[in-house]
Amino acid sequence: MVKILQVFSLAIATSTSLIASTTLAQPSHKLTVVVDGIARPRGQVCFRLYDKDKGFPQSDAGVIQSGCTNAQRSSVVAEFRGLQSGTYAVTVFHDENNDQKLNTNFLGIPREGFAISNNPPIKIGAPKFNNASFSVEGDTTIRVNMRYL
């Protein structure tokens, strides 16, 4: 009888821990960003992923993932993995001279190509996070168009 109770207790403990780990585990998603319109296949294309407006779009503050890929064609693809469901925004720039920054003129106007999620219109100043943000609820693919001024 004691042996049966021990086995029964072990079975309950195991099933309870499995249920707890299943309910606590949050799914992770993949975001694929396709960048079209790269004018010159040289240098690299760099990406920054934000999950809030802090630092968006010009600062590293608030960046949750980033990286660069070679600009070998007129289109490149980047993937961000391990994302939770939520709201995100992406900035992209074509680092033609491989100096790890978006080069600008003395007025702050970009000298290299750039792109922002949702392809918002560019007016005076940079777009706001809420104009560039999109929802990730599962694996998601977005397309952005590189702009050269």
Image (spheres, rainbow, N blue to C red):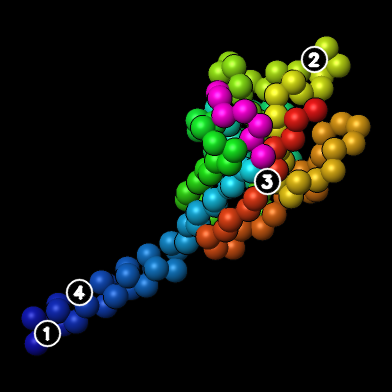
- The residues bearing labels 2 and 1 have C-alpha atoms spaced at a distance of 78 Å
Secondary element type, mark 4: helix
Residue at image point 61% right, 24% down: 95
- The residues bearing labels 2 and 4 have C-alpha atoms spaced at a distance of 69 Å
Quarter of image, res 36: top right
| Quadrant housing the N terminus | bottom left
Instruction: First in sequence, mark 2 or 1: give its number.
Output: 1
Residue at image point 67% right, 39% down: 37
- The residues bearing labels 3 and 2 have C-alpha atoms spaced at a distance of 23 Å
Closer to the camera in the image, 137 or 45: 45
- The residues bearing labels 4 and 1 have C-alpha atoms spaced at a distance of 10 Å
Q: Can you identify the residue that label 1 sits on?
A: 4
Q: Residues within 10 Å of mark 3 (few under 14, many from 20)?
A: many
Q: Can you identify the residue that label 3 sits on?
A: 144
Q: Which residues are magenta?
A: 37-43
Q: Nearer the viewer, mark 4 or mark 3?
A: 3
